Amino acid sequence: MKIIVWVLRFLPLVYMAAIWYMSGQPDNLVIELPDHGVDRFFKESLHLVEFGILYGLLFLAALTFSGFRPLWSYVFMGVSILYGLLDEFHQSFVPYRSATAIDFVKDVIGVLVFSHFLHHAHFSGKFSRLGRLLDRVDSLARK
């Protein structure tokens, strides 16, 4: 079980490195759909989840430590949002990428949506199925 704990702790860093690497590459590096409109829509919609996932990974990593408090959830929201801003800034220097305020807004919305579900599932007892899953992760650190 300790390996799972360490994977959960290390995963946010790996994910942040992957975001940094991918944002420095052409947007068709991983996938390019045949229909340009669908391709653009798909990739633009990823902004809504990309930094929400980062928040989720930070949240899960924190659950593996004792003393996880609601304040940390808000700190991770800030870290995820700031990393989204840094990512947009980084992309502004990449010739074949763009950095826009609307992309940053989508990043923020993704973080807020993910945080709503995870924060309330763990601390408020809402979303009971998700809460039980988070409790399992929380208990891994105690074994």
Image (tube, rainbow, N blue to C red):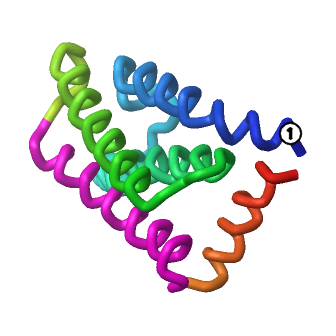
Total tally of numbered discs in the picture = 1
The question of residue 60 being in magenta is answered with no
Percent of width and height locating residue 14: 58, 27
**View extreme (front): residue:** 67
Q: Residues within 10 Å of mark 1 (few under 14, many from 20)?
A: few
- What is the x, y in percent for residue 122? 55, 71
Can residue 42 be seen in this snapshot? no
> Which of 59 and 113 lies nearest the eye of the viewer?
59
Quadrant holding the N terminus: top right
- Boundaries of the magenta span: 100-126
Q: Position of residue 96 (x, y in %)?
A: 24, 20
Q: Residue at x 20, y 45 (%)?
A: 103
Identify the residue shown where x is 38% and y is 55%.
71
View extreme (left): residue: 101
Q: Is residue 32 left or right of residue 132?
A: left
User: Does residue 96 lie above or below 67 as drawn?
Assistant: above
- Residue 50 lies left or right of residue 121; in this view the side is left
User: In the image, is residue 108 above or below residue 87?
Assistant: below
Dominant secondary-structure state across the stretch colored magenta: helix
Residue at 46% x, 75% y is: 120
Q: Secondary structure at mark 1?
A: helix
Mark 1 is on which residue type?
Lys
Q: Is residue 87 visible?
A: yes
Seen at 85% across and 36% down, the residue is 3
In reply to whether residue 121 is colored magenta, the answer given is yes
Q: Which residue is mark 1?
A: 2
The image quadrant of residue 26 is: top left
Query: In the image, 89: left or right of 26?
Result: left
Residue 131 coordinates in the image, percent (x, y): 62, 75
Query: Which one is nearer the viewer's eye here, 55 or 23?
Result: 55
Q: Is residue 54 above or below residue 123?
A: above
